[in-house]
Amino acid sequence: MIKKIPIIQIGIIVLIVIASTTGCITEDTPSVPEEQTEKDIALILMNHFINNTISTAYNTLFTDEIKEQTTVTQLELIWTQITSTYGDFIEITSTKTTEEQGYIIVYVTCNYADLGLLDTRVVFDENKSIAGFQFAPTDISDQYQPPDYANSTLFTETNVTIGEGTEWELPGTLSIPTGDGPYPVVVLVHGSGPNDRDEAIGPNKPFKDLAWGLASKGIAVLRYEKRTKQYSSTILNQLSSFTVNEETIYDALEAINLFDNYDTIDNNSVYVLGHSLGGMLAPRIAGQTTALKGVILMAAPTRHLEELMINQTIYLTGLDGEITQEEQGQIDVIQDQVEQIRTLSIAEDEIILGAGLAYWEDLSTYYPVQTAESLSIPMLILQGKRDYQVTYEDDYTQWNNTFADNQNVTMNSYETLNHLFISGEGTPTNTEYMTPSNVDEQIIIDIVNWITNFSGE
């Protein structure tokens, strides 16, 4: 039987809670005893989930902002999703307390019967109230293994800063082939969510694979922390005005302009490679600069994000041929929010699926295919046929129908590759993202050949 994994993280920008909708507000939240630490409170929250007393946590531990965005019923549904997916709770294995942009954050790692470890990330404000939380896979990136096609003797890496001197400085890594150059350079642009520079998920690091693979073949690569990861806690207070400009586009433009002082980089051969959301936005990025030689779109959606989200939810919950009452409840909640997004029936201070009115209003008038048609630079569009998130049938087909006869556009699809461009077999699920693997070597080969062709002109 196929093990189905419902979408746990459905937020676009940065998760405040797992699912959000307008809910009740409790006016008088009891103060937290001064002797309790944030770690103590995070453990109390988890025990309320475990003991099915989440209403107590809702009334006593959360900020009013959280209560405005979710209900007790939704929190109970989330916990049902967690335990039906990961199995019965076994034990709390560890905790970790960090500070990010002035917020105290506690990670509570729990062990579950079926799928093992899962983190609950709890964000606290200055009053020790819970200002945000999310369930997220436990970091197992230490299981990452570099791909065989990467040869670390053929390139060097240096630390760089994107947007240096601005309020949104981002640490990055520039991989440069050894030798005098000048070399073409690719700027990697992330998908949805608060991604790191490697776009790590579980033990896999597709952006690191791309960087090391391309740098081994004579192409420099820049990758960097996404703003919504580096400044996640700060951005929590700005969601009502946040758009894809702040999330992705402005930082990509800063990255494109980084190479003026690098003699080993060919400033006339700068490319943007966008994956998923980054691929969807790549044409929009390219339209705002004259510095690009070309763009590469990997698993780039042509549909609106809210449509992808509901389709992914229905796909994953139906993998075993049955949709339970709890799963239908999840679908109904997301469908209601998707309808709010489609009609822009969103209050100014309301957060829907992790983003506010400004975000959804901006994307409602953006059509990536039409924007791509206005570009005069070459494009390379790549798609895995086992991708259930951005699909061959619904997304790649539209790219292909539009650009099949365009000599400036190269299109490749791959029978066995998933959304991460990792090879697999059988019915695709997101459980395979937890298996250590690497971006398929054919992707590296095809990108190198394409760039070599155009950079030689």
Image (cartoon, rainbow, N blue to C red):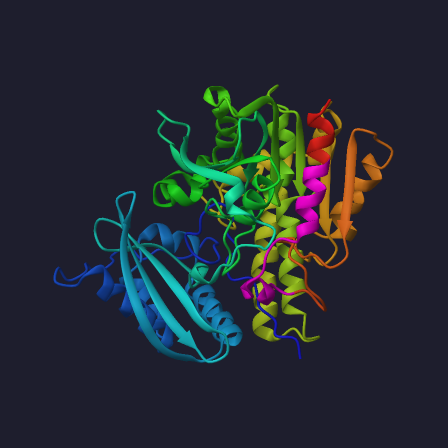
| Quadrant for the N terminus in the image | bottom right
Residue 191 position, x and y percent, is: 56, 45
Q: Is residue 294 magenta?
A: no
Q: Is residue 192 visible?
A: no
Q: Is residue 265 visible?
A: yes
Which stretch is magenta? 429-449
Left or right: residue 232 compared with residue 145: left
Looking at the image, is 235 positioned above or below residue 442?
Answer: above
Name which residue lies at 63% across and 27% down.
286
Name which residue lies at 52% across and 76% down.
84
Residue 96 position, x and y percent, is: 28, 61
Residue 362 position, x and y percent, is: 57, 34
Residue 378 position, x and y percent, is: 73, 28
| Quadrant for the C terminus in the image | top right
Quadrant assignment, res 270: top right
Q: As rendered, which of 146 and 36 lies closer to the eye?
A: 146
- Farthest right residue? 405
Name which residue lies at 42% across and 36% down.
158
